[in-house]
Amino acid sequence: MVSVPVAGSGRARRGEGEAMKAAIVTRFGSHWSIEIGEAPKPVPAAGELLVRVRAATVNRTDCGELRHPLIERLITRGQPRRTILGLDFAGEVEAVGDGVTAFAPGDRVFGMNPRSRPGAQADYICLPESGAVAAIPAAIPFDQAPVCEGAYYASGTINAFALGPGDEILIYGASGAIGAAAVQLARDRGARVVAVVDGQHVELTRRLGADRVIDRTTPEFTGMTERFGFVLDAVGKLPVRKWRRLLKPEGRFAVTDLGPWWQDAPFLLWSAIRRSPRVSVPLPARGSAPGFVRFLADRMAEGRFRAAVDRVYKLDEIAEAYRFVQTGQKAGIVVIEIPAG
């Protein structure tokens, strides 16, 4: 078992002599390594919550941070590399720092841990009371609650498109974390959703509320001649020739990354030069995460948004979870269960 110091936020104090169990990255890059070890248990500073994590996830963002640390350094503007990853979390407030009024010990909470702090793939995290955290609706178990990251990025596209009743959107890769969330967020706005997925995910996507679900390998999709006002490639794998045929002349296309071999980069650049929204990688507005988590909590409480869980791993199995996510075959989210005690 490894034991390493953990970079903190600069605001949280660290408990002397107290340790917690964590998944610790011992090597970044293509030959990455994660081991279960001990790290200092955080202590909440003023305005912070100490959360006993009960469920986390492994997602595409975590895999990118693990495999491409130089890109991560650019994204975080050169902040110190953290060795405990994990954005999504669900758990119980164990303690609060001075001045905290919105939460109390025993509250069930979920949200997104700041990327500048040690992550949620551990027994405990500290995060600001003002951060991306909200109460878990009463009927939602912990393993159904760490759903924010994919939904947050999906919301960037849904908001940029300003979808509403009468609009129709085609979502390619609608069974992944971003795609499954986009289906539900678009339907919540009253839009009609056409979802394209692998055959084994058709029923799942239908249960999420898509109006029409198409197996991407069938002639219904490969020979599709319909055109749409809005197209979202939620996995970055839709060939250029295909999305251009699917899009109406005045339509808008969004993609979650640059695609294989950066195939979409020229179209993104041309749209940027022309100041056109036709092709984009829409991102949520800076500082919008706290409000979005509260919005999502309301939708979950009303039954208008739910998790699509592919599988659940124990913390001790987290390396296996990372290997599975990197296959690109997951549907929805991959949960890491962190039992109490």
Image: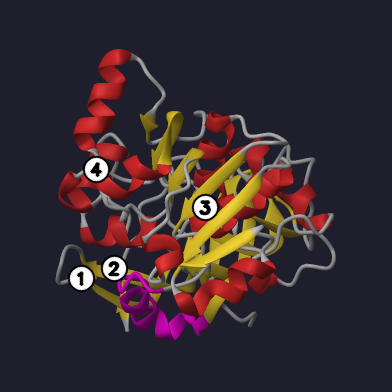
Q: Amino acid at mark 2?
A: Val
> 246 above or below 321?
above
Q: Earlier in the sequence, mark 2 or mark 3?
A: 2
Label annotation for residue 73: 4
Between circles 2 and 4, the one closer to the viewer is: 4
Tag of residue 25: 2
- Mark whose residue sits in front, 2 or 3: 3
**Mark 1 / mark 4, whichever is N-terminal:** 1
Mark 3 residue type: Glu
Q: Amino acid at mark 1?
A: Trp
Q: Earlier in the sequence, mark 4 or mark 3?
A: 4
Q: Residue 240 location, x and y as percent? A: 26, 45
Is disc 4 surrounded by few (<14), some (14 to 19) or many (20+) residues within 10 Å?
some
Q: Is residue 121 inside the magenta stretch?
A: no
Assess disc 2: are there few (<14), some (14-19) or many (≥20) residues with their C-alpha within 10 Å of its C-alpha. many
- Magenta region's main secondary structure? helix
The residue drawn where x is 55% and y is 44% is: 169
Q: Which residues are magenta?
A: 312-329
- Say whether residue 183 is left or right of residue 26: right
N-term-proximal mark, 2 vs 4: 2
Q: Quadrant of the N terminus?
A: bottom left
Check disc 3 and report the residue beneath it.
Answer: 149
Relative to 17, say whether 291 is above or below.
Answer: above
Q: What's the distance in space between the residues labelled 3 and 1, CA to CA?
A: 23 Å
Quarter assignment of residue 275 = top left
List x then y, in percent, for residue 25.
29, 68
Q: Which residue is mark 1?
A: 32
Mark 4 to mark 3 CA distance (whole Å)? 19 Å
Kindly give the residue lying farthest to the top in the view shown: 274
Q: Position of residue 23 (x, y in %)?
A: 39, 73
